[in-house]
Amino acid sequence: MNNKGQALVVFVLVLPLIILIIAGVMEMGKLSLTKNEYENSIIDTINYGLDNLDKENVKEKMTALLDKNISGTKNVEISDGVIKVHVTSNLDGMFSKLFKSQYDINLTYKGYISEGKKKIVKD
């Protein structure tokens, strides 16, 4: 029996699976990276807001900061020393034209000053 082509046949059959796994890892990595960037921008914006609560137009300046760094819908609420930032965004996947995939990012963070320290928590 001649076994010369068996390894090539197995490789050709397994190659699409390997490519699919690599593409999935890349897709989830991109989504995770984008979500992390959004969270960092929200936290930085809340820190700015907590440092400047007593100044005028803080809400507008915070919204402008979010607009520079985040796409999607942004909502900033300030009441009784509590700043609440809510962001929703729809991201196309790397292979969205192929698989019609779109990911929703929905983040809400709340910041306030308690006992002289800034507290920022995910809501």
Image (tube, rainbow, N blue to C red):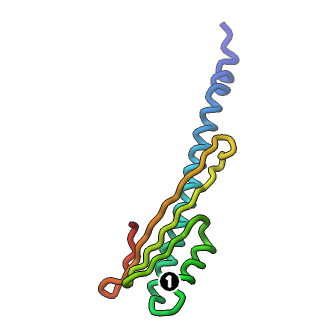
> Relative to residue 43, is residue 96 drawn left or right?
right
Residue 102 pos. (x, y %):
59, 50
Task: Give the tally of numbered discs.
Answer: 1
**Residue farthest to the top, as pictured:** 1
Q: Residue at x 53, y 61 (%)?
A: 35
Residue 100 pos. (x, y %):
63, 43
Which of 48 and 7 lies nearest the eye of the viewer? 48
> Relative to residue 74, is residue 12 drawn left or right?
right
Q: Residue at x 60, y 42 (%)?
A: 22
Q: Residue tagged by mark 1? A: 48
* Label 1 SS: helix
Relative to 96, say whether 54 is above or below: below
Q: Residue at x 60, y 46 (%)?
A: 101
Which of 23 and 60 lies nearest the eye of the viewer? 60
Instruction: Give the quarter of the figure containing the C terminus.
Output: bottom left
Amino acid carrying label 1: it is Tyr
> Relative to residue 16, is residue 78 drawn left or right?
left
